[in-house]
Image (spheres, rainbow, N blue to C red):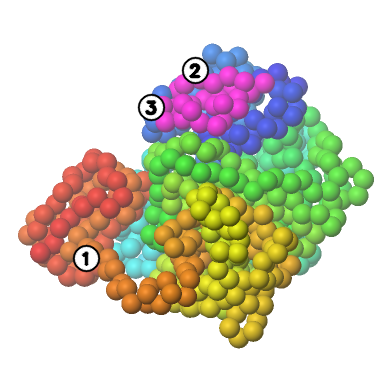
Amino acid sequence: MFNKILIANRGEIACRVIKTAKKMGIQTVAIYSDADAQALHVQMADEAIHIGPSPANQSYIVIDKVMEAVKASGAQAVHPGYGFLSENSKFAEALSAAGVSFVGPPVGAIEKMGDKITSKKIAQEAGVSTVPGYMGLIADADEAVKISNEVGYPVMLKASAGGGGKGMRIAWNDAEAREGFQSSKNEAANSFGDDRIFIEKFVTQPRHIEIQVLCDAHGNGIYLGERECSIQRRNQKVVEEAPSPFLDEATRKAMGEQSVALAQAVGYTSAGTVEFIVDGERNFYFLEMNTRLQVEHPVTELITGVDLVEQMIRVANGEKLTMTQDEVKLTGWSIENRLYAEDPYRGFLPSIGRLTRYRPPMEVAAGPMLVNGKWQGDAPSGDVAVRNDTGVYEGGEISMYYDPMIAKLCTWAPTRAEAVEAMRVALDSFEVEGIGHNLPFLSAVMDHPIFIAGDMTTAFIEEQYPDGFVGVDLPEEDLRRIAAATAAMHRVGEIRRTRVSGRMDNHERKVGTAWNVAIWGQSYDVEIDADPKGATVTFVDGTSLRVAGNWTPGDQLAKMMVNDTPLILKVGKISGGFRVRTRGADMKVHVRSPRQAELARLMPEKLPPDTSKLLLCPMPGLVVKIDVEVGDEVQEGQNLCTIEAMKMENILRAEKKGVVSKINATAGDSLAVDDVIIEFE
């Protein structure tokens, strides 16, 4: 077995690989850029080597710099993680020439299947059903438009060396094809150092389902079930689960056997993923093969008990697989939610800054321990598992230079319904402050009827949130539970306040029992009858709710019980009450005495400032280009400028007609959120 492995990556996947390597007794080497000098993966590794400036195209994807680190460290093998150089055949060749093992497939397999254009040609030649498209190289935007018309709109423009949603655009007409071609090329060049683009038919109402394969160098290959990855935003997966709620056993078997046959046809070894589009009749079409470890691999690990990173390392070391297909058993259900540094209330735009608070839910293992990738004794049953793969820590910085993913939160339970409920609790317990993030949106998805029914397609987010995410409207029953809990919490705070003041000997008698709770336009008059074990909160209609919990003033997470049902609230203090976040809702709750409530109703509402004549920067980022000049008359929907953040280009468009009066930025400028880019007359 190897003594030392270098991880040619960063963030959560580098941390993930380090954990397994340490478990196997293998020393680890991290590489890092300027921006990652204090990163978690650097702290976790046994040693770390600096490889250059912050931009990935000057550090993490520069083969020569990574190879210098490999040589300096004396590492015997390199695990590439995902993204960056993970599917770069030249990198694998450089390692082979240096006598260093690549923890991944052979160069030939990478070249044949890692390249999206070549892989589709091979699949077609092998008789695999594929989505119609054009696999040749596309010279320019004019040719992209011509091909798109031949294939038929809508089309998908995709980076040949792409992944993770980078370099991908859907075009419904010529204008979008022309614009998408250039943006895809730019993103592909910046993310992968390869700007080749291909075009395929965009299949409407599809489900995205992928098969995990594992092959060794001795002719053995198995599939470890499927993952449902249909909930995506901008072609970037957000929620994954295993198994799929849509497949039956016959379809699973057919997809799995086809995936293994395709992998073995190209001499594939290591872990890989074959992706399919599946229609409503369970017909499946090959999309591509990812010749690397997938972001969403934890859900497969949780239902199979197989450590995929360990198996990759063992295969790279020349070992045979220890499992046969008959021994692969899918147990229970697992859900993964990707926590991104993206603000859902601002159109999911990237957010950077310092994590002033980062408190994931406690990780919990389910069932018996795993030994050598197999369940010892019975498979887990009746338990719930919580897993959080992350690459950040409280006080750390979220950089503008890399992918915005903060963590992958996973739950496992015996059934899908239990796994979803465990995820709801875990999301409510996850504390993140200092940046915008998508936790509220993830909570909303977990409660959405379509997701609960398992009927989602890749159009889920676009169809269910056509105007963006604006929060969640909680039902009356939930509002009452929150009102009761916050009233009881406010009473605890009042008792603490009177104790601190030292003005009242019998403080509990002096704190009132009648309160008004204002929440989301609702007003609840309540009476609180407290005792040492909790409080009974009675509403004016006679309804009573029993509230218990150990919350104390200053706690930012309140784990309460309301009528013996858990209620988890993220809590912030505001004047006269709390800022409360739960189940995707973000609300201000004011708890007042009856007299205070009466006076509050007379207060005028503060209006927000008028920014209708300003184009504000919606995210921290770099100005790629300005498309207008002073004096230009712009039309609704017209391109104004392009901002790059976290490897993605974002085009800002005019919301209405206007005349440009002033431009405050130029290409190359670094902007903060709400910086004024353009002013209008």
Q: Residue at 31% of width from left, 50% of height from top?
A: 673
Label 3: how many Cα within 10 Å (few below 14, some 14–19, many 20+): some
Q: Secondary structure at mark 3?
A: loop
- What percent of the width, then of the height, locates residue 211? 68, 53
Magenta segment: does it hold 562?
no
Q: CA distance from mark 2 to mark 3?
A: 15 Å
Q: Which residue is mark 1?
A: 610
Q: CA distance from mark 1 to mark 2?
A: 54 Å
Q: Name the secondary structure under disc 1.
A: loop
- The spot of residue 11 in percent (x, y) is 53, 36
Q: What amino acid is found at the position of numbered circle 3 in the picture?
A: Pro
The structure residue drawn at horizontal position 43% and vertical position 40%, both measured from the top left corner, is 354
| Sequence-earlier tag: 3 or 1 | 3
Q: Is residue 341 above or below residue 508?
A: above
Q: Label 1 is placed on what type of residue?
A: Asp
Q: Quadrant of residue 156?
A: bottom left
Is residue 289 among what the camera can see?
no
Comparing 360 with 107, the one in front is 360
Residue labelled with disc 2: 68
The verdict on residue 42 being magenta is yes
Residue 508: horizontal and vertical position, in percent? 61, 61
Boundaries of the magenta span: 27-51
Instruction: Give the residue number, with chain letter if any, for mark 3.
Output: 53
Residue ID at (38%, 59%): 346
Structural crowding at the residue carrying mark 2, measured as other residues with C-alpha within 10 Å and reported as few (<14), some (14–19) or many (≥20): few
Question: Can residue 175 be spotted in the picture?
Answer: yes
Using the image as rendered, state which of residue 70 and residue 129 is in the foreground. Answer: 70
Query: Mark 2 belongs to which amino acid?
Result: Glu
